[in-house]
Image: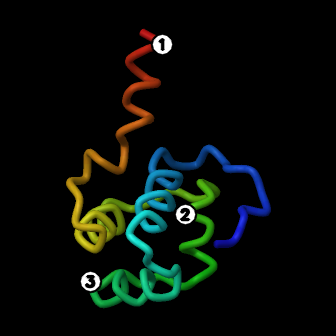
């Protein structure tokens, strides 16, 4: 498994969880991208890498497709961030 070369950005809330869930399920990035493309999302490896690295925003269509491919509810993609938000209130 490759180690992340760059720090995470702050352009989205879901990138880290997507990366973690994908790796937990043993899905290679290129295979994951292919499945997302089959769901109708126009995604290339660079764009996906930026999404995981939280360098770019994710569209609602991408979030939906990613949750379906990972076979999780959309809320699971936001899980740890939701706890952080609640603890700062």
Q: Which residue is mark 2?
A: 51
Residue 4: where, in percent of width, then height?
Answer: 72, 62
Task: Say which residue label 1 marks.
Answer: 88
| Figure check: 88 above or below 29 | above
Q: CA distance from mark 2 to mark 3?
A: 17 Å
Say which element carries label 1: loop
Position of the C terminus, as image quadrant, is: top left
| Position above or below: 9 against 42 | above
Q: Secondary structure at mark 3?
A: loop
Q: Alpha-carbon neighbours of circle 1 within 10 Å: few (<14), some, or many (≥20)? A: few
Q: Is 31 or 60 nearer to us in this picture?
A: 31
Of residues 75 and 10, the one drawn nearer to the viewer in this rendering: 75
x%, y% of residue 17?
A: 45, 52
Question: Is the image coloured rainbow, by chain, by secondary structure, or in one colour?
Answer: rainbow
Write down the residue under mark 3: 39
Which quadrant holds residue 72? bottom left
Q: Is residue 68 left or right of residue 79?
A: left
80 left or right, relative to 67: right
> Residue at the location (43% across, 67% down)?
22
């Amino acid at each position: 498994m490759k180690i992340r070369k760059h720090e995470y950005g702050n352009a989205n809330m879901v990138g880290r969880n997507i990366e973690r869930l994908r790796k937990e399920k043993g899905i290679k990035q290129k295979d994951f991208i292919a499945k997302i493309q089959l769901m109708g999302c126009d995604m290339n490896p660079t764009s996906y890498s930026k999404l995981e690295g939280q360098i770019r925003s994710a569209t609602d269509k991408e979030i939906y497709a990613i949750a379906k491919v990972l076979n999780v509810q959309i809320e699971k993609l936001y899980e740890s961030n939701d706890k952080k938000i609640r603890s700062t209130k």
